[in-house]
Image (cartoon, rainbow, N blue to C red):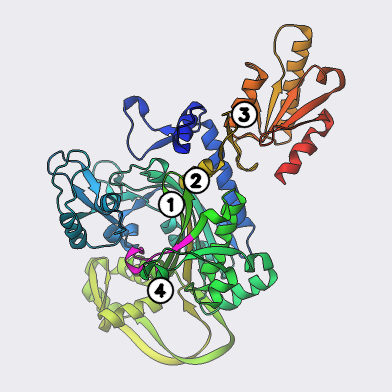
């Protein structure tokens, strides 16, 4: 191993050599922003996903369910969500060579100043003041302009309807909110989780696995009643002291506005009581996310939460914290984001779809209230609708009456099947009724994790070079691509060698039948096989040797210490299982 290589260079070389990852379509020169994952890399990714499911779906104090929705998204959905209007990045083009760059990133790389969220005019002013040129040819750059990051497609052949590849999994969860709420017996709080592929047409991705055009998101939309959030979270923290006292490193927006980059450590309860978070559920999920990263092997001192400034937040967010991990190659990089989306998404989908995406909040005691009731006037609607009358009446019957009334009162009309129906075409009367509750639009907190970014920071953090210049990938046991390796000491045609191989293969079968994933290798010297296993992070290696065929004992070697101990074959399952509880 060359001593002067950086950890990143060693990792990239190892990744291709051992089947972890490499650029996609490499035989055709590759395409920026796309990577393939080999058998070892895919296994590691799947194990990270399983750990995420454990910590954010199963081992939580609230009801969270997982769903799956399509990758292709009708245009109207992303119009309603605001992505079609807001999901853009600033681009600048070289007038000489035609290369296109993301303007804010180019500025940051050139002058070392963060400019995310600035307007096109502000970015252009900086480019001119600092005389920033094309990094490739030194040519003049054009004034920045917004570029839509959505991948366009069509649903149906020929003249299909416009659609996009989803840039996040969130909208599938918002549009399914009512379905899942019904399944959950109309109870809040409620979490809906999804893991899936997404596409973002990045302008000039140049950071390996950190800025991809196609990647995997592990996302959770958590719906709750904001009037109950403080009480609900405090009750959980009273029962779980370890969660209440979880320590999080926070870089607040206030600190950044003061020109500082100092983080301060808060406990979960501190975040709530000192009003660092806009809602208590933000603190809860940030603490859960902190535990998740710690448990999969990221040191606490390399994790921080960076609160986004107003101009840095997404269009749907009232408050955002990026969870970042410190890397050797790239410095602090975002691996997850926590956004307080309030009612933005559900409200927008109610507006565009006319569907009822509310939650019925029951009162402790019924109340007498004055309430407006609305019903269509068939005679007037027939005059306006003509032959569309049956379809319009059917559409009106399926609409939420409260939303219909609100729209009529705000606009004076409602548009149904391209027919504007005025307020005068409805019967509206006020009467005193006994109500048992009210419809509310739940608030939402979203923890969203980038799988490939977590994958990269975990590999970088796990990569170790021993004193004898050997590579060891010290992945946490649950993340490793295989739980154990099985090796016969030697293989060959001599009777004792054949017995070793047969016994090793029998052990492999026993392990697999007990749901223990196994890497089996009988090629080359035992030393080289240990090296191969260490390089892909297998924590335990079982070796069948001459003594094994005499007394049914084997050696178990530990990856990180290289220490070995001898145990009977009957004890192998118990020995391995203790490391994966």
Q: Secondary structure at mark 2?
A: helix
- Is residue 94 in view from this perspective? yes
Q: Is residue 491 above or below residue 232?
A: above
Mark 3 and mark 1: span between their CA atoms?
A: 29 Å
Residue 161: horizontal and vertical position, in percent?
A: 28, 50
Mark 1 and mark 4: span between their CA atoms?
A: 44 Å
Mark 1 and mark 2: span between their CA atoms?
A: 9 Å
Q: Secondary structure at mark 3?
A: helix
Q: Which mark is residue 400?
A: 4
Q: Secondary structure at mark 4?
A: loop
Range of the magenta residues? 305-318
Q: Nearer the viewer, residue 522 or 5?
A: 5
Q: Quadrant of residue 399?
A: bottom left
Pointer 1 residue = 333
Q: Quadrant of residue 237?
A: bottom right
Pointer 2 residue = 457
Asked if residue 22 lies left or right of residue 551, the reply is: left
Work out whether mark 3 precedes mark 4 in sequence or the reverse, and give the earlier one. 4
Quick check: marks 3 and 2 in contact, CB under 8 Å?
Answer: no
Q: Nearer the viewer, residue 545 or 393?
A: 545
Pointer 3 residue = 533
Question: Residue 308 lies in magenta, yes or no?
Answer: yes
């Amino acid at each position: 191993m060359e001593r002067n290589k950086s950890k990143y260079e060693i990792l990239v070389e190892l990744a291709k050599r051992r089947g972890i990852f490499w650029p996609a379509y490499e035989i055709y020169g590759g395409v920026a922003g796309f990577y393939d994952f080999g058998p070892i890399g895919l296994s590691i990714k799947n194990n990270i996903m399983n750990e995420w499911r454990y910590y954010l779906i199963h081992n939580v104090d609230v009801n969270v369910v997982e769903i799956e929705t399509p990758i292709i998204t009708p245009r109207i959905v992303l119009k309603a969500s605001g992505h079609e209007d807001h999901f853009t990045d600033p681009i600048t083009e070289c007038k000489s060579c035609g290369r296109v760059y993301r303007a804010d990133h180019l500025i940051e790389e050139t002058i070392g100043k963060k400019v995310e969220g600035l307007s096109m005019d502000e970015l252009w002013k900086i480019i001119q003041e600092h005389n920033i040129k094309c990094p490739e040819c030194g040519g003049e750059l054009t004034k920045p302009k917004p570029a839509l990051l959505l991948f366009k497609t069509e649903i149906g052949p020929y003249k299909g309807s416009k659609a996009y590849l989803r840039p996040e999994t969130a909208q599938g969860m918002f549009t399914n909110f009512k379905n899942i709420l019904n399944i959950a017996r109309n109870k809040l709080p409620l979490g809906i989780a999804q893991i899936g592929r997404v596409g973002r047409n990045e302008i000039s991705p140049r950071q390996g696995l950190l800025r991809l055009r196609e990647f995997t998101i592990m996302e959770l939309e958590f719906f709750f009643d904001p009037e109950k959030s403080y009480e609900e979270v405090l009750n959980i923290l009273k029962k779980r002291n370890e969660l209440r006292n979880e320590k999080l490193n926070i870089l607040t927006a206030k600190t950044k506005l003061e020109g500082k980059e100092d983080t301060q450590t808060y406990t979960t309860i501190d975040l709530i009581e000192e009003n660092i978070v806009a809602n208590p559920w933000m603190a809860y999920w940030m603490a859960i996310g902190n535990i998740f990263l710690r448990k999969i092997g990221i040191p606490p001192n390399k994790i921080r939460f960076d609160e986004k400034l107003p101009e840095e937040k997404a269009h749907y967010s009232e408050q955002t914290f990026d969870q970042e991990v410190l890397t050797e190659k790239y410095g602090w990089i975002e691996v997850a984001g926590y956004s307080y989306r309030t009612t933005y998404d559900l409200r927008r989908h109610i507006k565009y779809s006319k569907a009822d995406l509310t939650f019925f909040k029951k009162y402790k005691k019924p109340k007498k209230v004055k309430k407006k009731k609305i019903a269509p006037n068939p005679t007037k609607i027939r005059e306006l609708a003509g032959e569309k009358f049956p379809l319009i009446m059917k559409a009106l019957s399926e609409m939420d009456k409260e939303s219909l009334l609100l729209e009529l009162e705000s606009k004076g009309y409602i548009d149904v099947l391209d027919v504007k129906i005025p307020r005068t075409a409805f019967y509206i009367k006020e009467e005193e009724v006994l109500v048992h509750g009210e419809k509310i639009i739940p608030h939402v907190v979203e923890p969203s994790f980038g799988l490939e970014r977590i994958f990269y920071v975990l590999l970088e953090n796990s990569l170790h070079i021993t004193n004898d210049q050997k590579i060891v990938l010290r992945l946490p046991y649950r993340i490793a691509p295989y739980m154990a390796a099985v090796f016969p000491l030697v293989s060959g045609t001599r009777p004792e060698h054949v017995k070793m191989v047969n016994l090793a293969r029998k052990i492999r079968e026993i392990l697999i039948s007990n749901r223990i994933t196994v890497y089996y290798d009988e090629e080359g010297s035992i030393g080289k096989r240990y090296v191969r296993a260490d390089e892909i992070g297998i924590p335990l290696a079982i070796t069948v040797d001459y003594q094994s065929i005499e007394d049914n004992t084997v050696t178990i070697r530990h990856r990180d210490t290289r220490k070995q101990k001898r145990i009977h074959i009957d004890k192998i399952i118990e020995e391995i299982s203790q490391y994966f509880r």
